[in-house]
Image (spheres, rainbow, N blue to C red):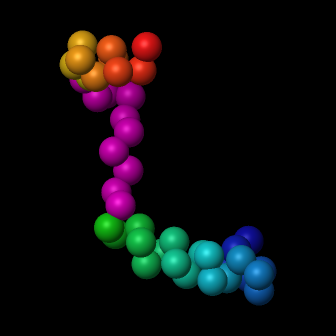
Amino acid sequence: MAKSDPKLRKVYLRHRRYKGYYPARSTPFRDNTPSQGKQYK
């Protein structure tokens, strides 16, 4: 949708440019240490 929408085109192109720099880190297989869990309580 963003490819064809003139208002979202700049956002889409910026996202495409950044995608290589910010790979997704979240995964259901990640092992969190106990200290990582404590900082959110």
Quarter of the image with the N terminus is: bottom right
What is the x, y in percent for residue 33? 22, 19
Residue 17: quadrant of the picture = bottom left
Magenta-tinted stretch: 22-31
Q: Is residue 2 left or right of residue 31?
A: right
Instruction: Give the overall secondary structure of the magenta segment.
Output: loop
Residue drawn at the location 38% of the way across and 39% of the way down = 26
Residue drawn at the location 48% of the way across and 75% of the way down = 16
Q: Is residue 30 left or right of residue 19?
A: left
Please give the count of numbered marks on the rendered protein: 0
Q: Does the magenta portion include 35?
A: no
Quarter of the image with the C terminus is: top left
What is the x, y in percent for residue 12? 60, 75
In the displayed structure, 31 sits above or below 38; it is: below
In the displayed structure, 38 sits above or below 26; it is: above
What is the x, y in percent for residue 40? 42, 20
Residue drawn at the location 71% of the way across and 77% of the way down = 8
Residue drawn at the location 29% of the way across and 28% of the way down = 30
What is the x, y in percent for residue 20? 34, 69
